Image (cartoon, grey):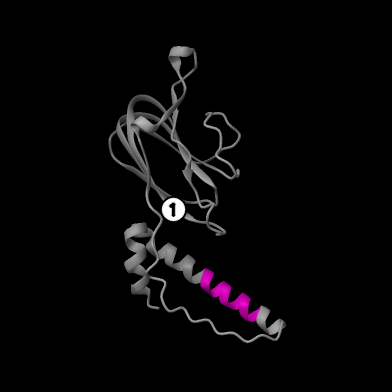
Amino acid sequence: MKKEDFKKVLFPIHRNFWQIAYKKLMSKISTLKSTLKRRSKENNIKFDIEILDQTKLTPAKTQTANASSFIQVTNTDTGDDSNVFVTSAFEGNQKRNFDSILHSIAIHPNAYTGKIDIQASCIENTPSTANNSSDWFSISNVTLSANSTIYHETFQVNANYIRVMSEPSAGNITLVQLRN
């Protein structure tokens, strides 16, 4: 399998990070082959692995949350210190058995000023939506000021769920897109 064949599939999904994904795939394939060879020798088993086609894999569908699907979990009108909004729990990589996985997120702000916290959860069932829930841990924080430019980030985390928590002082987030 040629590197260019992998690029055709990986580039539309991971854009400029396709080479990182390619290296991880090659590393995992190499580890799998060497582990199987070692175990086979130990148990007197002969095997041959030939990878004929990996370029026709279907990528995971992009998950989205628009402004109307954010859940307000604190509200200054009811006496809370700030307004905090969270997305519902996006699927992480619970359906796959990877040591780690690459996630790409795009956040579309509209004249947004405030804090954004990208969070993950490793619990088995859908985590709590509360902003102070111990079900979630922070992956990345960003503060934006009167921003309408798409914020994007690629990160690695082995988690069952991912969400975005927003604490705006002005503007809003119109769309969140997650690809893993």
**Looking at the image, residue 67 lies above or below residue 99:** above
| Relative to 54, residue 93 above or below | above
Amino acid marked by disc 1: Asn
Is residue 111 left or right of 6 when viewed as pictured? Answer: left
Whole-percent x, y for residue 139 in the image:
51, 43
99 to 67, vertically: above or below = below
Residue at x-position 56% and y-position 59%: 97
- Look at the image and tell me whether residue 81 can be seen: yes
Closest to the observer, 159 or 63: 63
Name the one closer to the observer, 140 or 26: 26
Residue 145 appears in the rendering? no
- What element does badge 1 sit on? loop
The residue at 55%/48% (across/down) is: 159
Q: Which residue is mark 1?
A: 180
Q: Is residue 47 left or right of residue 6?
A: right
Q: Position of residue 100 (x, y in %)?
A: 54, 57
Examine the image and state in which quarter residue 146 appears: top left
Q: Position of residue 148 (x, y in %)?
A: 28, 35
- Please say whether residue 33 is one of the residues in the magenta stretch: yes
Image quadrant holding the N terminus, namely bottom left
Highlighted magenta segment, given as a residue range: 28-38
Q: Residues within 10 Å of mark 1 (few under 14, many from 20)?
A: many
The main secondary structure of the magenta stretch is helix
Residue found 48% across the figure and 65% down from its top? 24
Number of labels in the image equals 1
